[in-house]
Structure formats: structure tokens, C-alpha cells
Image (cartoon, helix red, strand yellow):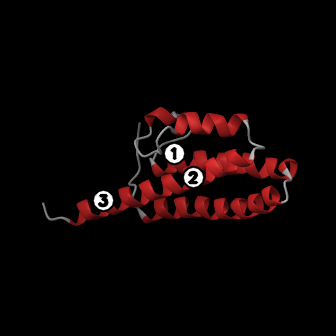
Amino acid sequence: MERTNISSQDHVQAVERVLGEWGQCKDELDIHFKNRDSDRALPWMKRAIDLFEQFLYLSNSMNQDLCSITDCEIKPVNVEERLEFIISRPKLFHSYKQLAELFAEQEKQFAKHVALNRAKNKRPD
């Protein structure tokens, strides 16, 4: 399992692109769930779920096609069970809130990991 340098600028930019797209999805989902329109929210939820999975693997420097969530070192607590709930019930407001929490938790863990790697790489040997 080959990993890329998690603190490389290209890698961080790829993560930022995914998070930017998540922000757009989140805005749309906010509107649809506020209007209680779960049918219109469904395609946005499906896209957001895909984005979370991309983010999870990207933040672990892993290929999504070759690895599973259990292989990820940087991940929210109980991510497998929480994601399973979201995927099985994407029209629920609770699923949306849970997905937003997963994004927030993963973003914090990724930022921490990047900061630790940068600090470790700056230390003299």
C-alpha cells in the first residue's frame, strides 16, 4: 500500500478542493432540509457521501479502489457504523447532520496530522 506525502502542497490542495465541493453541497443540503424537501436533497446527499469517502482516503493518502475504511489510520470514531447509517438512510435529516459531523471530525484530524508531519520534518535529526 503506497502512500503519498500527506503534507505535500498538491495533496493538501486536493483535500481543499474536496472540502470546497463539500461546502457547496452543504449549502444546498441546508436549503433542502430546511424546506423539508428530502427528495431534492437526495442527489446532494449521494454526492456528499462520495465526497466524504474521497476525503477519508485522500487524507490517509490511500487509493479508494485498493483500500478499505478499516485500513485508514486517520478517521473519526465509529466511522464505519456511522457511514453505514448515512448510506442506508440518505433522505433523513439526521443522516445529513451525521455526515456533516464526520466531515468536521475528519477535517480536524487531517489538520492535526499535517501539522505534526510538518513539525516532524522541520526538526533537525
Image-based side of 123 in relation to 82, left or right = left
Dot 1 surroundings within 10 Å: few (below 14), some, or many (20 or more)?
many
**Who is closer to the viewer here, 34 or 100?**
34
The amino acid marked with disc number 1 is: Tyr
Q: Position of residue 46 (x, y in %)?
A: 74, 45
Q: CA distance from mark 3 to mark 1?
A: 19 Å
Identified at 56% across, 49% down, the residue is 102
The residue that label 1 is drawn on is 57
Dot 1 and dot 2 residues touching (CB under 8 Å): no
**Residue 106 point in image, percent of width and height:** 49, 52
Is residue 53 shown left or right of residue 43? Answer: left
Secondary element type, mark 2: helix
Count all numbered tags in the image, as a single digit: 3
Identify the mark at residue 116; answer none if there is no mark.
Answer: 3
Q: Callout 2, which amino acid?
A: Glu
26 lies above or below 94 = below
Q: Do the CB atoms of the residues marked 3 and 1 lie less than 8 Å apart?
A: no
- Residue 65 visible (yes or no): no
Q: Amino acid at mark 3?
A: Leu
Q: Secondary structure at mark 3?
A: helix
Q: Residue at horizontal 51%, vertical 50%? A: 58
Q: Position of residue 69 (x, y in %)?
A: 51, 36
Instruction: Decide which of 106, 10 is in the foreground and name it.
Output: 106
Among numbered discs 1 and 2, the one appearing first in the sequence: 1
At 40% from the left edge and 42% from the top edge, which residue is drawn? 73
Q: Label 2: how many residues lie within 10 Å, few (<14), some (14-19) or many (20+)?
A: few
**Residue identified by numbered label 2:** 101
Label 3: few (<14), some or many (≥20) within 10 Å? Answer: few
